[in-house]
Amino acid sequence: MLRSESVAWPVTVEPRRMHELSIMESVLEMARARAAEEKAARIHKIVLRIGDVSGVSLDALTFAFEVLARDTQAAGAELVVERVPARCRCGECDAVYEPADPLAGCSACGALRGSLIQGRELELSSLEVS
Ligand SMILES: [Zn+2]
């Protein structure tokens, strides 16, 4: 019931897109600043590291990139996304594991007291400019 309601209601889509737009705005701002430091005229490639549980939609991010990079020095640049898997440390036995789903317990002892130590990344990893 809830699920079909939220899919049918287009308003829920817009804020997400806004979110990715503002993320991409700051990525491009950082890229431009870096290109200026290098006295480069063009940005050829942008590599991002994005955690699997960062809540960022890659589709929306790619869309935002195409819209925002148009007619800028990053136009036509390649956008590469390196995905970072979620990783937890168990609060019971201290094992580090990659949960199969967000509700999965520790793979060593089954405890549900894991804390996320990796997977929320959202970073500009590298850049190619000239
Ligand atoms: Zn454990």
Image (cartoon, rainbow, N blue to C red):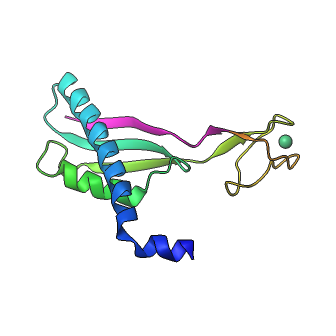
Q: Quadrant of residue 17?
A: bottom left
Task: Ligand 1: give its quadrant.
Answer: top right
In the rendered view, does 50 fall on the left or right side of 33? right
- Find residue 67 and report its horizontal and vertical position in percent: 21, 55
| Residue nearest the observer in this picture, 22 or 38 | 22
Find the magenta span and give its range.
Answer: 116-130
Q: Residue furthest top?
A: 37
Q: Residue at x 81, y 38 (%)?
A: 95
Q: Is residue 81 above or below residue 41?
A: below
Q: Residue at x 29, y 58 (%)?
A: 63
The quadrant in which the C terminus is found is: top left
Provide the major secondary structure of the magenta segment. strand
- Find residue 68 and report its horizontal and vertical position in percent: 20, 49
Q: Is residue 129 above or below residue 74?
A: above
Q: Quadrant of residue 93?
A: top right
Q: Is residue 66 above or below residue 33?
A: below
In the rendered view, does 58 fall on the left or right side of 87? left
- Find residue 25 and report its horizontal and vertical position in percent: 27, 42
Q: Say whether residue 126 is magenta.
A: yes
The quadrant in which the N terminus is found is: bottom right
Image label count = 0
| Residue nearest the observer in this picture, 98 or 23 | 23
Q: Say whether residue 33 is magenta.
A: no
- Find residue 56 and report its horizontal and vertical position in percent: 45, 51
In the rendered view, does 19 fall on the left or right side of 71? right
Q: Is residue 25 above or below residue 70?
A: above
| Residue nearest the observer in this picture, 101 or 130 | 101
Q: Residue at x 88, y 46 (%)?
A: 109
